Amino acid sequence: MLGSAPGGRDPEGIRDTNMIVVDTNVVCYRWISSPKSTAAETALAKDPHWIAPVLWRSEFRNVLALAIRQKALTIDAAREIARDAETSFERCEFAISSDAVLQLVAMSNCTAYDCEFVALAEVHQVPLVTVDRQVLHEFPKIAVSLERFAAE
């Protein structure tokens, strides 16, 4: 089910005290083995309720496409990873208002893509866990690095 972030509504009552917004990089580290996978698993154990804007799916598919082309994953493995990741985000994906995203774009040098994650975190008043240095620099009050979050 798709939620709606504008206005801070929490359809379905999914918000709890252990909720964070994660960017696509963190999702990738959770589902595709990498040196940062341990930190992603630690973050998941700490706060198991991950949410993201719907955009994460397209970005994640791009990462899988690159892995397929580089022969790092087979098509079957990529499909399985995609299914598992998508299942883990059921009822945890949100449409973000263009107004909110564009307001953040206007006050930063971040892409509209990155600002979708920031906007979702702001609406739900939860941290955005990311490895994106620019997002961390531009939005220090809401963005926290994966490494710091996992270590806290």
Image (cartoon, rainbow, N blue to C red):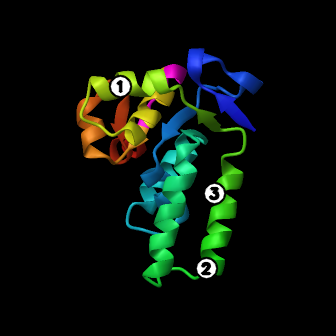
Find residue 63 and report its horizontal and vertical position in percent: 47, 64
- 98 and 142: which is toward the camera: 98
Compared with 70, 21 (above or below) is: above
Tag in front: 3 or 1: 1
Give yes or no for residue 149 being in the magenta stretch. no
Find residue 72 and report its horizontal and vertical position in percent: 47, 81
Residue 30 in view here: no
Q: How many marks?
A: 3
Compared with 15, 78 (above or below) is: below
Q: Are marks 3 and 2 in contact (CB under 8 Å)?
A: no
Residue tagged 3? 85
Which of disc 1 and disc 2 is earlier in sequence?
2
Callout 3 environment at 10 Å: few (<14), some (14 to 19), or many (20+)?
some
Which span is picked out in magenta? Answer: 123-128
User: What residue is at 59 percent from the left and 42 percent from the top?
Assistant: 54
Residue tagged 2? 75
Which quadrant holds the C terminus? top left
Which of disc 2 and disc 3 is earlier in sequence?
2
137 left or right of 14 in image: left
Find residue 108 and report its horizontal and vertical position in percent: 26, 29
Residue tagged 1? 104
Q: Amino acid at mark 3?
A: Ala
What separation in Å lies between label 3 and label 1 (alpha carbons)? 27 Å
Residue 52 sits in which quadrant?
A: top right
Which of disc 1 and disc 3 is earlier in sequence?
3
